[in-house]
Structures are given as C-alpha cells and as structure tokens.
Image (cartoon, rainbow, N blue to C red):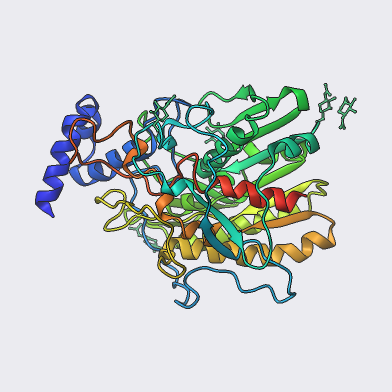
Amino acid sequence: MVKKMLYNWKYWWRSLHNHNYFIIKLGVSILLVGLAFRLLYTRSTGFSPISDTPLLDNSRISPPVSPLISQENTDGFPPEDDAGKCNIFIGDWIPYQGEPIYTNESCSFIDAQQNCMKNGRPDTGYLHWKWNPRGCKLARFDPDRFLESMRNKSWALIGDSISRNHIQSLLCILSTIEKAVEVYHDEGYKSRQWIFPTYNFTISVIWSPLLAKAAIFEDMNGVSTSEIELHLDILDMNWTKQYQNFDYMIISSGKWFAKNAIYYENNKVLGCHNCPKRNFTELGFKFAYQKVLHNVFDYIIRSNHKGMIFFRTSTPDHFENGEWFSGGSCRRTMPAKEGEFRLSDVNRVLHEVELEEFDEASAKASENAVNLKLFDVTPLSLLRPDGHPGPYRFFHPFAKDKNAKTINDCLHWCLPGPIDSWNDLLMDMVF
Ligand SMILES: *[C@@H]1O[C@H](CO)[C@@H](O)[C@H](O)[C@H]1NC(C)=O
Ligand SMILES: *[C@@H]1O[C@H](CO)[C@@H](O)[C@H](O)[C@H]1NC(C)=O
Ligand SMILES: *[C@@H]1O[C@H](CO)[C@@H](O)[C@H](O)[C@H]1NC(C)=O
Ligand SMILES: *[C@@H]1O[C@H](CO)[C@@H](O)[C@H](O)[C@H]1NC(C)=O
Ligand SMILES: *[C@@H]1O[C@H](CO)[C@@H](O)[C@H](O)[C@H]1NC(C)=O
C-alpha cells in the first residue's frame, strides 16, 4: 500500500509539478485524494472551462451512517408494473447495428473529458447497443419531430455534472437538424442556455448539484477546503427563481449528498455528515437527502406548474478493483448482465430515497394537476459499465507510454454513448 502510494505520489508529482503550492498545503493523504479529484473532475481543455464535479472534493465518499437498507432487490430494478402497462425502464440492452446519430466530428458540444472517440478509446462496441423495454417498443429519438413540437417551448436540465453530460447528448442529437446557438452562460460556464433559432426552442442547463441552498468551499483548483454548508430547509434559488419560465424540466441530484457537509435548519446547525473534528451530531447523508428531496417535491407539488416535470434518479458509477482515488477502473467493453453489478451502498441509499420521496409526492402532484414523472435511469445505467470514459477522459492517455497510470472516470458517460438512449425514453414520455 505504502509503496503504491509512493508510486502514485511520484507520478502525480511529475505530472502536476505546477501545483506544488497545493501539495505543500495539504498532507499526503489529502493530496492523493484531492489531486485525483482535481484530475478526475476539474481538468477541462475543450468544451468548457469548468470543473466537472459530481463528487469533486477531497473528501472520500464514506458510507452512510444511518443503517443501510436491506440487501434484497439489490440490482435496483423497479418491480414489474402490475397494471400490465409496459414500464419502459424495465428491459435489456440489445445489439444495435446502426451508427450513433452523431460523432466527435459532427458534434461540437461534447466535453473534452467525455469525448471518448477523440481521446482515442480503441473499442467501439459500446456504441452499438440500444435499450429495449420488455413488452413494448421504444422508438429512436426523432430530433426533427422533437424540435417541430417544441416550437416556442423551453426545457431545463437541473442538477450536477451528469445533467451537463445529458444536455450535451441532447444538444448533439438536436444539432443534426439545426445547430444550437448559445445565448447565456454564467461566469463559470456551469449554467448555460442555448436556442434553436428556427424553432424558438430554448434549452438550459442549471447548475444546482444539491438543489438546496449551499455554501461550497473550493480553492482555485476546485478542491474542497471545508465542509459544504447545506441548508436543508432552503431550496437553491439557482433553479427556483427560473422555475416558472420552463415548460419542461428534468430535475436530479444525488452524489453530492455523500460529501462532507454541515447541515443547517432555520440557519442553525442541526448536525453534519463526516465532520469528526467538529462537535456536531453525525446525521448521515440519507437524512439530508430525504429532507431536501422532500422539500423539492413539496415545492413542485405546490407550484401550480403547467408543464412537465421529470425527476431523474441518480446514476451509478462502475469503479472496479478500487475507487477513483485508488486505482479503480472500468475496462469493460460490453454491457453487464442483469444482477452482475450491484449498486454500491451509496448509490443504493440514494436511489431508495429517490423512489420513496417520489412515490410520496406523486399522488399529491396529480391531485394538484402537476405533471410530475419519474425518470428512473438508475437500473438501466447500472447495466452499462462499458459506457464510461475510464482513462479516455484524457487525450490519448497511452500515446507516450502504453502502461501509463491514469486516473479513470467511471462515473460520467462517453458521448456518443449509453445516455443517448435516455433521450429515446424522454421522447416516449413526452409524446
Ligand atoms: C474523432 O475521432 C477519431 C477517432 O475515432 C479521430 O481520428 C478524429 O481525429 C477525431 N476528430 C475530431 C474532430 O476530434
Ligand atoms: C418565442 O417563444 C416565446 C415563448 O417561449 C414567445 O414569448 C416569443 O414571442 C417567441 N418568439 C418568437 C420570435 O416567436
Ligand atoms: C410562436 O410564437 C410566435 C410569436 O409569439 C407566434 O406567432 C407563433 O404562432 C408561435 N408558434 C407556435 C407553434 O406556437
Ligand atoms: C448557483 O450557481 C452559481 C453559478 O453557476 C454557482 O457558483 C453556485 O455554486 C450555485 N449554487 C449552489 C447552491 O449550488
Ligand atoms: C460537545 O457538545 C456537547 C453537547 O452539545 C457538549 O456537552 C460538550 O461540552 C461539547 N464538547 C466540546 C469539546 O465542545
């Protein structure tokens, strides 16, 4: 272990010699974790100058403190729909002979870190699968029909870097009809808006990784310097202030809740998750996620919104033989068989809370004529360990040394890649 750490240390030292002020500042253990996070989530050379940060700080994701849920049904599949209606989220990935609708050549919206083709990923099998619900047909996303029916309409994808990953997929597909024009971005390129001029169709991505008011402490490298201060009872204005402007929204959260945080209610400290140096009660992230999602749904239910609101569940990562900071990788080139991968403890707790809170909200939403739908991509995403950039988050990582050690991204998704299928599912739910 020590030897390995030493090796990694040297490796990072060599490749990151320009960050030594940071190295001095933090201890070795934090360094290993922090730099890796920086590497994994903040280096960006192309599409946008921002950190790519679903986990993104130097805190190790720790298991929840609250009791883990039972081990049964651990593949995360939803139960069969007993009304006999086809549930499009229950199905299989089946071979697909066609080519993806866009490539690294035809689409300019792909984040450099997720541009697996450009970055030299050698295998292409992962591009040739499509999601096939059991018992019903799922049409391919039809960008022409989609744009025609979205004249004068607006969409927003609200959440973390997986929402960004998703909007890039959608932008690439829609841009085969007309190129999107950017009309807004914030200072850090985290929240952005595009328009498809012919259709007067606008689409936004809104950065709100926790959906609630939060102070996030990061240094200039995007590495966390202190616990997040999360207000469990106050929603993040980043999305609520624009909420009524959108006809369609896809709201999601997840991984950020597993990070070290101090929880507030009524502007007073209630407790924390993972703050051993402070004298606060450990509440566990499950508690916080339940509270925040409950408030999010409460807001939606009372909102009198006339459009369509999707709640997207969180997506699992597929690190094997380690975590992102300890040599974990994702080398698979084929989808997994059902049951082959289990949701990690963190992912399982997140998904469980998501389903529970959605179920509770769903009935109330329909009573209030709010069109709230579950977009449960967790189980089908779990079957795609082959769809992540892995080492190909970097440009040609093995060009100089075919045994080069790199840090893998087994969390975001290659574009083109599996999450293009999410749009097939969306299209089905919209029409
Ligand atoms: C796209 O990827 C291919 C390899 O799959 C590469 O040869 C080509 O240079 C890339 N093009 C761009 C514009 O990145
Ligand atoms: C574009 O759509 C908005 C509604 O989203 C509408 O208010 C506006 O008038 C439209 N503009 C044009 C030029 O059609
Ligand atoms: C879009 O908005 C413009 C301007 O308000 C209007 O003239 C046009 O009919 C609208 N189109 C649709 C499809 O609603
Ligand atoms: C709101 O958006 C801004 C700009 O994108 C970002 O810096 C800030 O962290 C966001 N707020 C929260 C609570 O995530
Ligand atoms: C920690 O908190 C408890 C209860 O709030 C208090 O009794 C105790 O004195 C505190 N300890 C320190 C070291 O502040």
Residue 76 screen position, x and y as percent: 51, 68
Left or right relative to 172: residue 38: left
Residue 139 screen position, x and y as percent: 68, 51
Residue at 32% across / 36% down in the picture? 39
Q: Nearer the viewer, residue 284 or 16?
A: 16
Left or right relative to 331: residue 238: right
Residue 77 screen position, x and y as percent: 55, 69
Count of all numbered marks drawn on residues in the image: 0
Residue lying at the far left of the rendered structure: 3
Q: Nearer the viewer, residue 424 or 61?
A: 424
Residue 365, picture quadrant: bottom right
The N terminus - image quarter: bottom left
Q: Nearer the viewer, residue 115 or 306?
A: 115
Relative vertical location of residue 260 with respect to residue 108 in this rendering, above or below: below
- Evaluate whether residue 134 shows in this view: yes
Residue 191, picture quadrant: top right
Left or right relative to 125: residue 6: left
- Evaluate whether residue 299 shows in this view: no
Residue at 39% across / 38% down in the picture? 41
Relative vertical location of residue 86 with respect to residue 22 in this rendering, above or below: below
Residue 263 screen position, x and y as percent: 50, 53
Figure quadrant, ligand 1? top left
Relative vertical location of residue 210 with respect to residue 204 in this rendering, above or below: below
Residue at 49% across / 49% down in the picture? 128
Residue lying at the far front of the rendered structure: 97
Relative vertical location of residue 129 with respect to residue 105 in this rendering, above or below: below
Residue at 64% across / 28% down in the picture? 193
